Amino acid sequence: MLEHFHVPEEDEVRVMSADLRRSVDSVFRKLGLNDSDAALATDALVSADDRGTDTHGVSNMLRRYVEQFGAGFIKPDPDWKIVRESPTTANIDCDAGLGLVVVPKAMELAIEKAEKNGIGAITMGNGRHAGMMAYHAMMALPHDMIGYAITAGGQNMVPTYGAEPRMAANPHAWAVPAGEMPPFVLDISSSAIAGNKVALLRRMNKPTIPGLLAAADGSPIMSEESLPEHTWMLPTGATREMGSHKGYGLSVVAQVFGGILSTGAFGDYSMGHMSHFVAAYKIDAFTDVARFKSSMDDFMKYLTDTPPAPGHDRVYYAGLIEHEEAIDRAERGIPLHEEVIEWFDSISAELGTEPLVR
């Protein structure tokens, strides 16, 4: 994450992952999830904080889940089912189940199909938020598979040249195993900024930086300024001259694979309704696993050995920073903003759940 979005040290409270997981698990069980689903949702959610993907961790998402469970928008015990299936594919009706729970189970099915047939692909409709998409893609890694995960839904991003939102910041995530090197894990939003980073900026009272957001009329904000009351997301690239058609196109692809392919859904189909897609590719269906991993190691080293440009210390690849951040946070704890700590204190008192130890 860019330094601009990090919680300032003077405002952060470090919480160990195990303590955070205990409190979060208690909240999910109080919301009606059974023990195994609560544990799965907790792992998916807190794993984002472990890796430094704070936008999709407890700070922004847990309070939203509490509100949506309370409103009946998310079902704690959905009757999700496969509505269409082939040896390599399936279409699932999530029955308004939390994506943190249903999507990992769909990925397990994709992995099972890939184990038998080389490839497994699952599309899902009538779903709810699925958290950090890298979590689902990374499930393929221990199986010597490449994982892919998408989610789509909502309208908070303007198309290139658009004055009104028609798409969302639909993310794509790929996870590719290596041998000795940390895996390649690319988790990218179709928008110039992940939507939850706006909440981070507001929480920290920071301005936006150029090329991330659009004003209410769709005009790209191309200077550093205080956050307007109403903003829209811009596609990755910000403007057509800088390549916004690429981010716009990625968002459309996510909507096709998640929404159109599953239920035909797109556009404003109720705020919070999400569609998903996951796939697993078995490496030995294409090539020798040992050779592949060795080549990935060489490739990742080839990238990190790139001489850094002036003003920079080193060159990274997708997933390396998160890997290193996870090691650091395992030792020092997860940095949460004071406002988030206060919310945990409030919600634990309200629900009678495990208080957050820090």
Image (cartoon, helix red, strand yellow):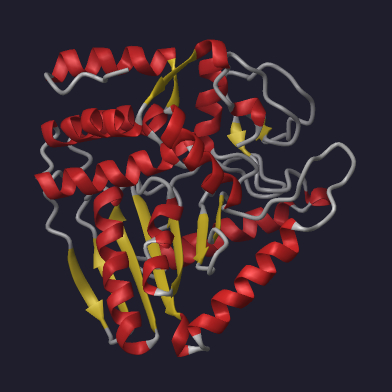
Does 2 sit left or right of 11 as displayed?
right
In the displayed image of the protein, which residue is found farthest to the right? Answer: 310
Query: Residue 65, located in which quarter of the rendered image?
Result: top left
Q: Position of residue 268 (x, y in %)?
A: 42, 47
Classify 316 as above or below 207.
below
User: Which residue corresponds to the image point at 68% horizontal and 16% vertical from the top-left?
Assistant: 226
In front of the other: 16 or 100? 16
Classify 13 as above or below 243.
above
In front of the other: 69 or 111? 111
The mark total stands at 0
Q: Does residue 205 appear in this view?
A: yes
Q: Position of residue 155 (x, y in %)?
A: 49, 43
Q: Position of residue 234 (x, y in %)?
A: 65, 41
In front of the other: 274 or 149? 149
User: Which residue corresponds to the image point at 47% horizontal and 81% vertical from the top-left?
Assistant: 283
Does 17 sit left or right of 27 as displayed?
right
Q: Position of residue 43 (x, y in %)?
A: 29, 45
Query: Which quadrant would the C terminus be assigned to in this image?
Result: top left
Classify 204 as above or below 234.
above
Q: Does residue 52 appear in this view?
A: no
User: Which residue corresponds to the image point at 45% horizontal and 59% vertical from the top-left?
Assistant: 150
Classify 163 as above or below 109.
above
Does 39 sit left or right of 295 as displayed?
left
Does 289 sit left or right of 78 as displayed?
right
Query: Residue 68, located in which quarter of the rendered image?
Result: top left
Query: Which quadrant would the N terminus be assigned to in this image?
Result: top right
User: Which residue corresponds to the image point at 69% horizontal and 63% vertical from the top-left?
Assistant: 301
